[in-house]
Image (spheres, rainbow, N blue to C red):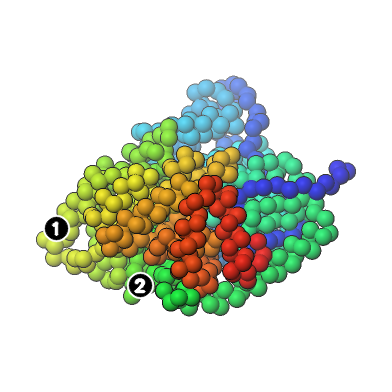
Amino acid sequence: MKTRQVHILHGVPASAGIAVGYAVLLDTKKIERYPKIRITESLIEDEISRFDVAVDLSRRQINEAKKKLEAQHITKEHVFILETHLMMLTDPSLQSRVKELINKDHINAEWALKTALQEIEKDFDPIGDEYIRSRIADTTFVGERLMRNLIGKKTSGFHMLENSIIVAHDLSPADTAMLNKEKVLGFATDVGGLTSHTSIIAHSLEIPAVVGLENASASINPGDKLIVDGISGVVIVNPSESQISDYEHRARSYLSVELRLKEKSKLPAITKDGTHVEVKGNLEFREEVRTVLDHGAEGIGLYRTEFLYLNRNDIPLEEDHFEAYKAVVEAVSPYNTVIRTLDLGGDKFYSSLGELKNEMNPVMGLRAIRLCLREVEMFKTQLRGILRASHYGNTSVMFPMISGMEELRRAKDILDETKHDLRKQGIPFDENIPVGIMVEVPSAATIADILAHDVDFFSIGTNDLIQYALAIDRGNEYVNYLYEPLHPAVLRLIKFTIDAAHNVGIPVSMCGEMAGREIYTPILLGMGIDILSTNAFAISHVKEMTRKIDLEKCRSIVEHIFSIKTAQEIYDFMSREIIENTPDIFDIT
Ligand code: PEP
Ligand code: MG
């Protein structure tokens, strides 16, 4: 029996909360070894039918996982991802590729599958326009499942003990669906960043999680006692009695704070000196709009419409756009809904759009507005949907990834042409629909003073702004430590953007993750941000922090932090400030 040694792992705090329980290891790591066998002509049919059986079994497993998710009323997002997996699994191009390889190259099904997956991952077939280009991660999950079923390894289907903490290399939505929510207290995974699947799922299940731990699955033994601190991103393996009682105390305080905040979530966020700060919600699926409003959102500050393009092998029609946006706008009115035009491409996921090749450097490639300006008809279809929906409630439109004036002018010209067409057809829309841009490319922040004259509002997208300004992939666990919202360069870009907007009298919102962390709230308010838009669960926190501060004090905080040279020193300063002035908010960190 191995000795159970105390050690501490550091990762990314993906979902807040504290869990104390026992490690259950899930073998989700890539199957590196698989049999490679050359087969004779007479075995070809056998190998093909082995593959068909594996596909069938995988389909049943995913369907079962999907049913469980639906029964648990988990957000549609996860069901959606599973549906994408199902489509990938049954996609004829994957199946025919594998079968062709078996047939032509006389190789066994495992080898053929691996080769086909590598081909798909490397180079999304340019002829196969109908192929659903989902995220590479999704391809991997589906491929892994097929491979496990082929070589007879059991997939997921775990028996949970009470107080389990799931430790895995990575977790797919299907893995998660097999978990018994009652018994699983937390997640700890090797890979992932704030935007990985595990983080998304953990967030909506409200289960504490730390991701990007690099080697949790290798260094934790089954049955090890664990503390998962999803607030500071720490996992303590085999903690001492005193560490356990300390964390149990923190967990109780955390829960009581959560409960208290939830009760006040619908009240407005008014600073001590009387300024009302609007706190809005971010939305991915129209089905989630109720949840977001129930968490106290005063409108939708970012509707990520690219999710409409998932789970289908064609491009949405104008009616699809219109219906989705109308439903949201009507539910949210009289509050405003900011509908962001398509931000497909990059590292989010791939679509069936033929233009999206497997680019060398996708986050800097044909993404968001760049794709729309190339696919003008597709862009106009979405704009028609947005404009038509604007007739039914308070709506704004926003362009993502604007990097310069030419792009903005072109996007606005296309919007004007679309308005003109609707007018000619006598279709009603809001003639004065506000037009804004995401400020998330450093060049846009740097010329915010120029861009500000041509828009009605800015919304700062810190997820990308930080990624591009600091040159770090936002999903890569090895460089996560560099992902620093308090980096002086980031703060300067934000401040410059806000000042530029205010100089011409337009409002500025922030809709990146930074808007949802209350340690940053005093800085953002001190810099003059007008609106904060965040995920549903952070709304009550941000509101509460806003109620506890006064703007004059925030301004002096900002003045001071601009003289500090590093992100860590600014963080330390902020922690001291907050502990001193609002001890009840941060008494558990
Ligand atoms: C951002 O970049 O901060 C943002 C809100 O957009 P997304 O996360 O969808 O890229
Ligand atoms: Mg972005």
Q: Callout 2: 10 Å neighbours few (<14), some, many (20+)?
A: some
Image spot of residue 445 (x, y percent): 35, 49
Q: Which mark is residue 335?
A: 2
Q: Is residue 167 above or below residue 152?
A: below
Please indicate whether residue 281 sits to the left or right of residue 386 in the image.
right
Q: Nearer the viewer, residue 423 or 364?
A: 364
Say which residue appears at 63% left-offset and 71% top-offset: 584
Q: CA distance from mark 1 to mark 2?
A: 27 Å
Image quadrant assignment for residue 415: bottom left
Say which residue appears at 22% left-offset and 52% top-offset: 412
Say which residue appears at 18% left-offset and 55% top-offset: 416
Please indicate whether residue 483 sits to the left or right of residue 225 in the image.
left
Under mark 1, the amino acid is His
Q: Is residue 228 above or below residue 327?
A: above
Image quadrant assignment for residue 207: bottom right
Q: Callout 1: 10 Å neighbours few (<14), some, many (20+)?
A: few
The response on whether ligand 1 sits within 8 Å of label 2 is no
- Contact (CB < 8 A) between labels 1 and 2? no
Residue 566 seen in the figure: yes
Image spot of residue 262 (x, y percent): 56, 74
Q: Which residue is mark 1?
A: 420
Under mark 2, the amino acid is Tyr
Q: Nearer the viewer, mark 1 or mark 2?
A: 2
Image quadrant holding the N terminus, namely top right
Please indicate whether residue 250 sits to the left or right of residue 260 in the image.
right
Image spot of residue 361 (x, y percent): 43, 35
Q: Nearer the viewer, residue 440 or 40?
A: 440
Q: Secondary structure at mark 2?
A: loop
